[in-house]
Image (cartoon, helix red, strand yellow):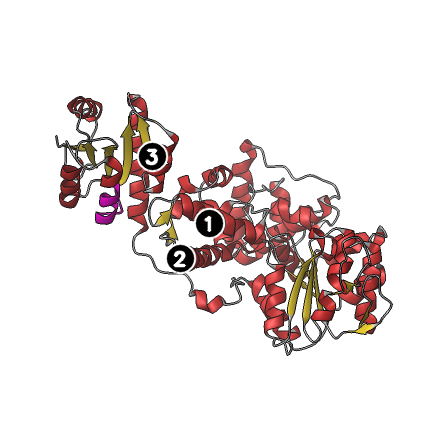
Amino acid sequence: MTTSSKSPTILVVDDDQEIRYSMERVFSSRNYRLLTAASGEEGIEIVRRESPDVVFLDIRMGGISGLETLQHLRSIDPNPMIILMTAYGTTQTAIEAMKFGAFDYLMKPFDMKKVIRLTEGALKSREDLRRIGDYRPVINSEDYREGIVGRSEAMQEVFKMIGQVAASDATILITGESGTGKELVSRCIYQHSQRHKKPFFAVNCAALPDNLIESELFGHEKGAFTGATGQRAGKFELCDGGTIFLDEIGDMSLPTQTKILRVIQDGEIQRVGGSETIRTDVRMIAATNRNLEAMVREKTFREDLYYRLNVVRIRLPSLRERREDIPELIDYCLQKLQKKHKSRVRTVSPETRAALMRYEWPGNVRELENVIYRSAVLAQGDAILVKDLPEEIRAAGEGGAIPEEAGASGEGPAKAPVSVEDPGKAAAGAAGSVPESHSGESLSPAEPENMDVTFTALYERMREESHESILETLEREMILRALRETRGNQVKASAILGITRATLRKRIERFSLKDQL
């Protein structure tokens, strides 16, 4: 039966006439174009002619089976959402159904409400895929051979720093949250250094227990400890002339820190259990996600080692601080999957991109890469849809449109707008004098009845004064109040204002606020 040529087309393939009749009854009151087939062979011919949006396909039929039909349909047209139907709900059935690209599967006898829900969900996914349109890569993965992706201002500063320090032998300290790409940066420095033809070793200090890390780094003599059945050279000895990367150096014990300090100062090591001094020429790059300054104050990290490591410091921004890089990172991850795992997924839907842009990413780029990989595995077409994302990221995408600043300039999600507390103060601020702020005073939104008065005063003042002047004055005042409320804590102030810490620092400098805190 047909309602309209523009209506979604549903195909039911089942050799049971009662099932076909039941499905006709389910869809009779809805604006769908329904087609039926009594065999897999007939269903394949209908798909060739009609290109349906959703196909309900029985698994056990005379002639070719439902799973065989599914594989034929996928080779003809990858776009229909296929829902398998079965009275035999085994583990193998579920695995095989999803393995061959089914959208979902239904157990007989049907819950008709579930049939409608599944159909609506399948049609929405079909429409999402259709709206994506032609795919054009955001980036060329060859432009990022080192694997460090980003055009944001924060990442451009990192790239500049890498270029400046690569040719030297200076010790480098890379800081940043877990998952920001510290090892990638260390390898990039090595690749562009004069030592790139010599060895590079990466050691995760947090992954090795104290009784093994010294053996790993400095080697050991036969009989030095239980299990030391022979002499073994350590990483520093093997890396002579090259570069060693000590990741999570903040987790290193104090005795081992002392030996690292000696390597930096004198270029000398001793194997565990040995007395021979071995000279080694190694460039050291260290990284940590911990606050070494606080550890120095707490006497859990050697102060002299900290200063030896902190010759040149490169801070990697969190993904929250460079949201504008997320589209490129998504594309880069998908291109990697296509090359490494032959993934058919090429892009993401606009709604998926919005959810990924809004999520806070506590695990940073590493978490993003894992999410893209997981979602690509679950995707049933050539694009990742919102339904393919983990639940916590889908929830993040339900907050509406992406804040303009987050999408364009990489700043964090915008907070609820803060209203001017008093129209008189607003007018005074617009005229050039800054209203008095009080340390510890909390900003609260204006009452609804005062809103019109407040914005009327602001609008009238804008008609008289420079537009830029009033906006800058208001921005300056809001930043100053947030800083005073948080007693100068820039992390908390940037959270209140809904901007990144990097942006806040620029505003502080621009408005010369340091002396007023």
Taking the image as shown, residue 426 lies to the left or right of residue 115, namely right
The amino acid type, in three-letter code, at marker 2 is Gln
Q: Check disc 1 and report its element: helix, strand or loop.
A: helix
Label of residue 338 in the image: 2
Magenta residues? 70-80
Task: Give the image quarter of residue 182.
Answer: bottom right
Foreground tag (1 vs 3): 3
State the residue at coordinates (71%, 44%): 485
Sequence-earlier tag: 1 or 3 = 3
Q: Nearer the viewer, residue 398 or 198?
A: 198
- What is the x, y in percent for residue 161? 63, 70
369 vs 244: above or below:
above
Q: Is residue 305 above or below residue 96?
A: below
Q: Quadrant of residue 416?
A: top right
Residue at (35, 60) in percent of width and height: 136
User: Which percent across, then down, holds residue 283?
Assistant: 71, 72
Residue that numbered label 1 is attached to: 372
Q: Is residue 302 magenta?
A: no
Q: Would residue 360 appear left or right of 343 to someone viewing this image? A: right
Q: Is residue 74 magenta?
A: yes
Classify 10 Å Cα crowding around label 1: few (below 14), some (14-19), many (20 and above): many
C-alpha span from label 3 to label 2? 24 Å
Image height check: is 268 above or below 348? Answer: below
